[in-house]
Image (tube, coloured by chain):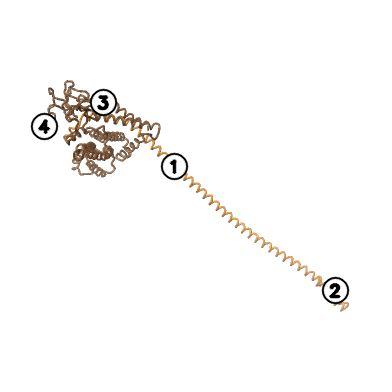
Chain colours: A brown, B orange
Amino acid sequence: MRVFQQSFKFLALTVLVFLSTTVYAQSSHHEDGGQIDTREEVDAYIAHHLQDSHDFTFFSYTNDEGERKHAGFPLPMILWSSEGLVTFMSSEFHHNDDGHVIVEKNGLKFAKIHSKIYELEAGATAVNFDAEHHATNGARVLDFSITKSVVGILVIGLLMFFWFVRLAKQYKTKTIPTGFGRVLEPLVLYVRDEIARPNIGEKHYRKFTGYLLTVFFFIWLLNMVGLTPLGFNVTGQIAVTACLAIFTLIIYAVSGNKDFWMHILWMPGVPILIRPILAVIELVGTFIIKPFSLLVRLFANITAGHTVIMALIAIMFVMKDTLGVAGATGLSFILSVLIMFIEVLVAFLQAYIFTMLSALFIGMAVAEHDHEHDHKIVDTEDVRSDFV
Amino acid sequence: METLLNDFSPGLFAVQTVLLLLLIFLMVKFAWKPIISSLTEREEGIQGALDAAEKARREMANLQADNQKLLQEARLERETMIKEARELKTKMIAEAEAEAQVQANKMIIQAQAAIESEKKAAMAELKSQVAGLSLEIAEKVVRNELSNKDKQLELVESMLGEATLN
């Protein structure tokens, strides 16, 4: 109980620190005026949410003077431009996201268009757009900013570290954890006994359990905070899921044994002429399809979840005229609640599937083959599972 | 696909890589290693305790079986002993009886022999006495014969009566 209270305090403190230091309201130059009524506006809003954000905004409103206000806090921008490192606070963009606010730093001009930072060409004073709304006189810079996603990663990382170090400390004095540790222990055991052990095998699983546990809790907790009104969409960022998938790829490529490489490059038990063709297929499968399936599965599931929830919430505005305010709100509420239950399940399921498949891929790389013929069956099954 | 690639932020990728590496390192060092080792230790402890209990139970069962066996053996031994004693008794009685029989027979034979010899002795004595008497009688008869016939007869008569009495 004590542990739970403390971690709760920790969370509350974190949120309070953010709130107290940075609640600020700024007027923005948004043309929408905060009103989202039409289908196009809903689409734009959803697309905007799905992207990473350079500000941490809790909510926005329009005040009596008709000004758009945002409650939240700015985040630091860290850009690698043509002149080197440039840093400033995201508040300088005044929540503008369509390239109309130009920030001048170190003699360079920056514009933010759909959460991406462009460095304008020398001499340009405003962003020029082509017919498809692409900037023509600016280039994207490397953006190492502490974005909302990075904040999410940091908060969840700290939370995980805090929780599990507490649990580890508990074992020093007692054999059975108390309080919140009692919730965490079965989850740790679950990952170890149901994911790592059966997929990697009794002999090698110990070495990889740490990675699998980290990834499982990282994905699950980030999926869960993605469902809160804080509006994180970390596991829906393709860069994040790509990073996770590449970690798994590196781990199984590095720890692959002789058998594993043999089966990729020079498949035993098939005619010599087919072996080079199989090698190409196996190389593509191992180094492209497997990690790609991992990163796209997680990204697509989370993105789809966020899109569906926001679309259902948008029923409230879009169908206001046909169903009436009460009808549209009721329908939207019921559907959102139902889909929310599914999303909670999906949050766990995707963390489980990512970890499970990572364990499976690692298991295939470290497996010791007794029978040469077993392997082909394992591989076809696996290729199928990649596409499912 | 183009939007997907366009949305890929290399900066976020780099930041995430660094943070994830750091997180994995910290979690493995300070959380997972101690947690997993404690859990393994606990599981081994439980397994050890269970094994010990099972061993103790098996030993107990063995002990009980041993006891039972000992008891069974003792019972068997007792029965054999009783049986042997009974047999011995019967045998001893039979032997004693046989011996007694033999002894008795012997005694009877001896007694019979003694009787026989006594009888023979008695007969011999009787014969000698009878002979003596007969001689005496014959002497007296001869004497009376020689004196008085009547008297002689009377004497023989009385003598005979006397002899019968004897």
Name the front one of labels 3 and 4: 3
The amino acid at mark 1 is Lys
Identify the residue position indicated by label 4 in the image.
A131
Q: Residue flagged by tag 4: what amino acid is it?
A: Ala
- Work out how far the residue at label 3 is from the one at label 1, CA to CA, in angstroms: 67 Å
Q: Earlier in the sequence, mark 3 or mark 4?
A: 3
- Confirm whether circles 3 and 2 share one chain: no
Cα distance, mark 3 to mark 2? 188 Å
> From mark 1 to mark 2, how far is it between C-alphas?
123 Å
Q: Circle 2 marks a residue in which chain?
A: B
- Quadrant for the C terminus of chain B, please: bottom right
- Name the side, left or right, on which A150 lies relative to B79: left
Whole-number angstrom distance, CA of label 4 to CA of label 2: 203 Å
Q: Amino acid at mark 3?
A: Val
Q: Secondary structure at mark 3?
A: loop
- Which of the 4 quarters of the picture holds residue A190? top left
Could you tell which of marks 1 and 2 lies nearer the N-terminus?
1
Which residue matches tag 3?
A23
Question: Chain under label 3?
Answer: A
The N terminus of chain B, quarter of image? top left
Residue A331 rendering spot, x and y as whole percentages: 23, 40
Secondary element under disc 2, as helix, strand or loop, is helix
Within 10 Å of the Cα at label 4, are there few (<14), some (14-19), or many (20+) other Cα atoms? few
